[in-house]
Image: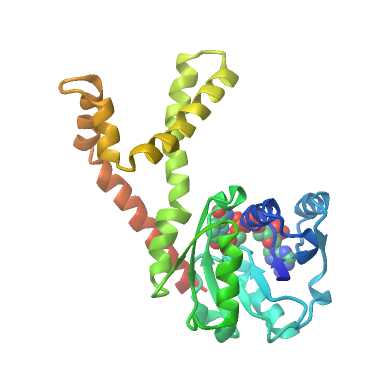
Amino acid sequence: MKICFLGAGNIAQAIISGLLKVNVSPRDIVCIERNLEKIALLESQQLSVQPLASVSDNMFDLIVLAVKPKDAIAAAQDITRIAPHTPILTLVAGIEIAQYPNPQLVIRAMPNTASTYNKGITALYSDNQMLHAFQQSVELLEKVGHVMVMKKEDDLHVFTSIIGSGQAFLFRILNIYLNELKILNKGNDEESIAMFKDFVGSLGDLFNQDRDFETLINKIKSPGGTTQAGLESLEKNNIESVFKEAFKAAEHRSIEINNEN
Ligand SMILES: NC(=O)c1ccc[n+]([C@@H]2O[C@H](COP(=O)([O-])OP(=O)(O)OC[C@H]3O[C@@H](n4cnc5c(N)ncnc54)[C@H](OP(=O)(O)O)[C@@H]3O)[C@@H](O)[C@H]2O)c1
């Protein structure tokens, strides 16, 4: 499969590095990028960076659109002008398929940066899921993690809030833990980071063992103990509704971005 990335910033680089880890050849990947720093990084990975003008129909199975929402429609118009029959796999948050110049050839994906480690979760949607390019998009993104096919395009807004943006919400929480550890372990930031890495890494291992958070919590908590006191404080402060409100805010913003374009 020959792939072209238009825009090769954070998310494109995450997917590209995941693909390279499963032996996709750098010769099958071409990037179109205008940012000089990013171009240097791509070239250091032996990736080819070409101008958009060098692209034509039949050169690529998919053109992956990975630019910020403000740049997306102009970039899609450029693609449609020079390669009108090439399917576009857009990673752009918020912009609905109907807004693209050639919607029948557009597939939407919402990936996350865990794709770098082949542990991504990507939601995919197309109006025509029988399209060969849709199957190819599934195949491509399964190389960098899990794929969830959405039945309705609107479900992408919810997915974006939980998995796309949601990763950042967990980072925000984990940063509170790291800062507390650094304060306790004054002057030993490197050591704190090393301990914190194991602390976070072990959460996945523990979940793997039990696959149920209630069981995991009950293994730590004892009646009247410290964990119970902390958990009660979290409940009193409505931890669940704090998160649900954050998900709703991100979902709402995703809908707004669509309407702004
Ligand atoms: N980051 C994530 O975790 C994530 C997750 C899911 C979806 N997304 C979506 O993916 C898209 C990209 O996000 P990102 O974080 O990867 O952005 P980013 O790091 O800013 O990367 C986009 C790159 O595309 C370049 N670019 C824009 N228009 C171009 C054009 N016409 N020709 C060549 N290069 C062009 C930009 O250059 P300049 O710097 O000069 O503008 C920038 O280097 C967004 O729409 C976002 O909604 C991101």
39 to 213, vertically: above or below: below
Q: How many marks?
A: 0
Q: Closest to the observer: 41 or 215?
A: 215
Looking at the picture, how far across and down is residue 257, in whole percent? 48, 67
Q: Quadrant of residue 149?
A: bottom left
Looking at the picture, how far across and down is residue 131, in whole percent? 55, 83
Residue at 82%, 49% in the rendered image: 44
Residue at 65%, 58% in the rendered image: 12
Q: Closest to the observer: 229 or 28?
A: 28
Name the image colouring.
Answer: rainbow
Looking at the picture, how far across and down is residue 161, in whole percent? 41, 57
251 to 196, vertically: above or below: below
Q: Is residue 140 left or right of residue 257?
A: right
Q: Is the N terminus in the top left, top right, bottom left or bottom right quadrant?
A: bottom right
8 to 87, vertically: above or below: above
Ligand number 1: quarter of image: bottom right
Looking at the picture, how far across and down is residue 215, in whole percent? 26, 36
Q: Is residue 28 left or right of residue 144?
A: right
Q: Is residue 223 left or right of residue 29?
A: left
Residue at 51%, 22% in the rendered image: 195
234 to 6, vertically: above or below: above
Q: Which residue lies most toward the left here?
A: 224
Q: Closest to the observer: 186 or 190?
A: 190
Residue at 71%, 54% in the rendered image: 20
